């Protein structure tokens, strides 16, 4: 099967990315629904709307951190299925909500699930991918292209109908069911299988994923490299989350993962673009339709231009400037879709070593992505209502002073490098100087821990 099966696996697993994008993006449509705002007696720039979005992100923080436990204990595949089932419960609660409490609990459940999926799916994809197509595999991202079009179609039900917002929320259940059931037909990550002493099964999966009829030598080399690296890593693996911060190499790699997620969240358009369009004079169904186009064509000069346009068109009465404002918002998604949108998840999943891959991705996603997103989700509707276009320049300043310099000076290029060889980009392989680092921190590693057949030879051959 080889590449075809590998790509098919990645695309199906990306249903989890669809849930991530849909669950986040669907609130763009919901807060644009007049029936929803009337039903809950609120406005689209109120603290209540901020709370609805921030509870989703807050739930995702805990879901991401939980994934650090479930991926190691139950595997990548089952973690994805658990996330899909939790999301199903959240979809039911939101779409049947009779009060604000049901909406908030449903958003927390959906966020919890998306937190699990947002860190488990990229890890699963990257561990199954061939190094030469890993970027393509992890970039297989369906996201929220459909969410605003579902919302736009539902808006035709009219402002007197609850269908206008209940159906977009209920539609979340469809990919949940598909993902939970469909994952039964796909394999576990070969690296997780080898880490749990199922080497024969891992080799079968590697062949199914990568065999092209004539690359037996490469498959054996890949298998042995994974086996050797895991053996070396097991010799120094220590429980707990604190170790990620005490070993210098692991701390550096963790910070890379956290940073790329933080930089990705310096963008508020996803949740509040309808509010932004309304500030430009496009109201009702038009604002939701424009949001749908935005998500289909899928962020520094653009934000500057947007801020300038809004400053000269505060009341949205200058139609030419309003069209220019929409154009610049669209440019954000074009730039984002070729940069942070897909690359942040690829990069984060690549830079973590196997010893802390589950915990590291959980922390980077939970703190760098979702905790920062929680902050912006709560603050943004209030800021957009109070200071309007001036709010954009917070992101402009951060990108100039922090994002660009950090990426240029400190980030490593990981393109087409195997997950095992990425160790070398950060200075050492598994048993390089890490034992010394651990001992410096007072971690006791008995001599018996190192008496694993072949580990000393592995250490010598891989350093």
Image (tube, grey):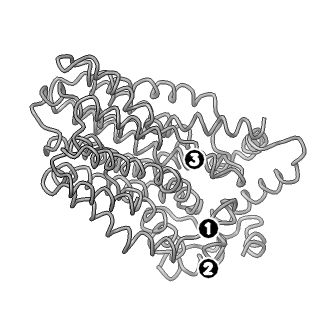
| Within-10-Å neighbours for mark 1: few <14, some 14–19, many 20+ | few
Relative vertical location of residue 28 with respect to residue 128 in this rendering, above or below: above
Q: Secondary structure at mark 3?
A: loop
- What label does residue 139 carry, if any? 3
* Callouts 3 and 1 close, C-beta under 8 Å: no
User: Which residue is at a point 46% across and 73% down the rendered structure image?
Assistant: 406
User: Which residue is at a point 28% across and 49% down the rendered structure image?
Assistant: 321
The quadrant of the picture occupied by the C terminus is bottom right
Mark toward the start of the polypeptide (3 vs 1): 3
| Within-10-Å neighbours for mark 3: few <14, some 14–19, many 20+ | many
Image check: 113 left or right of 377?
right
Q: Secondary structure at mark 1?
A: loop
Relative vertical location of residue 217 with respect to residue 114 in this rendering, above or below: below
Quarter of the image holding residue 86?
Answer: top left
Relative vertical location of residue 27 with respect to residue 242 in this rendering, above or below: above
Q: CA distance from mark 3 to mark 1?
A: 16 Å
Q: CA distance from mark 2 to mark 3?
A: 33 Å
User: Which residue is at a point 29% across and 19% down the rendered structure image?
Assistant: 156
Mark nearest the camera among 2 and 3 is: 3
- Provide the residue designation for mark 1: 413
Q: Position of residue 249 (x, y in %)?
A: 54, 74
Q: Position of residue 391 (x, y in %)?
A: 23, 59
Q: CA distance from mark 1 to mark 2?
A: 22 Å
- Provide the residue designation for mark 2: 433
- What label does residue 46 carry, if any? none
């Amino acid at each position: 099967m080889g590449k075809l099966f590998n790509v098919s696996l990645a695309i199906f697993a990306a249903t989890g990315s669809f849930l991530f994008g849909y669950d986040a993006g669907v609130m763009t449509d919901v807060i644009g629904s007049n029936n929803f705002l009337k039903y809950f007696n609120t406005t689209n720039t109120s603290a209540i709307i901020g709370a609805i979005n921030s509870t989703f992100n807050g739930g995702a923080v805990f879901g991401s951190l939980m994934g650090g436990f479930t991926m190691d204990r139950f595997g990548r595949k089952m973690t994805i299925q658990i996330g899909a089932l939790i999301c199903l419960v959240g979809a039911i609660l939101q779409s049947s909500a009779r009060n604000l409490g049901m909406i908030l609990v449903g958003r927390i459940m959906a966020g919890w699930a998306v937190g699990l999926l947002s860190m488990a799916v990229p890890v699963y994809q990257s561990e199954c991918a061939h190094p030469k197509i890993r970027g393509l595999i992890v970039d297989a991202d369906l996201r929220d292209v459909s969410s605003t079009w579902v919302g736009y179609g539902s808006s035709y039900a009219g402002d007197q109908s609850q269908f206008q917002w209940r159906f977009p929320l209920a539609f979340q259940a469809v990919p949940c069911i598909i993902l939970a059931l469909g994952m039964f037909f796909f394999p576990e990550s070969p690296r997780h299988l080898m880490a749990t002493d199922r080497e024969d099964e891992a080799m079968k999966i590697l062949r199914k994923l990568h065999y092209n009829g004539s690359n037996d030598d490469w498959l054996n080399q890949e298998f042995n490299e994974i086996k050797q690296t895991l053996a070396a890593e097991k010799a120094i693996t220590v429980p707990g989350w604190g170790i990620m911060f005490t070993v210098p190499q692991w701390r550096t790699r963790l910070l890379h993962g956290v940073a790329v997620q933080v930089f990705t969240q310096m963008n508020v358009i996803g949740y509040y673009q309808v509010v932004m369009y309304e500030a430009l004079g496009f109201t009702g169904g038009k604002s939701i339709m424009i949001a749908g186009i935005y998500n289909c064509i899928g962020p520094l000069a653009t934000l500057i231009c947007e801020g300038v346009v809004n400053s000269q068109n505060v009341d949205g009465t200058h139609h030419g400037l309003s069209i220019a404002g929409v154009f610049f918002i669209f440019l954000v998604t074009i730039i984002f879709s070729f940069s942070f949108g897909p690359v942040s998840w690829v990069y984060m999943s690549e830079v973590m070593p196997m010893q802390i891959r589950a915990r590291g991705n959980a922390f980077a996603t939970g703190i760098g992505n979702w905790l920062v997103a929680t902050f912006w989700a709560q603050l943004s509707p209030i800021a957009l209502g109070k200071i309007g276009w001036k709010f954009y320049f917070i992101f402009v300043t951060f990108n100039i002073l922090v994002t660009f310099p950090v990426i240029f000076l400190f980030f490593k290029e990981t393109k087409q490098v195997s997950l095992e060889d990425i160790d070398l980009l950060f200075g050492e392989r598994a048993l390089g100087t890490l034992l010394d680092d651990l001992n410096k921190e007072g971690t006791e590693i008995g001599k018996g821990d190192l008496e694993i057949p072949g580990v000393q030879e592995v250490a010598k051959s891989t350093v």
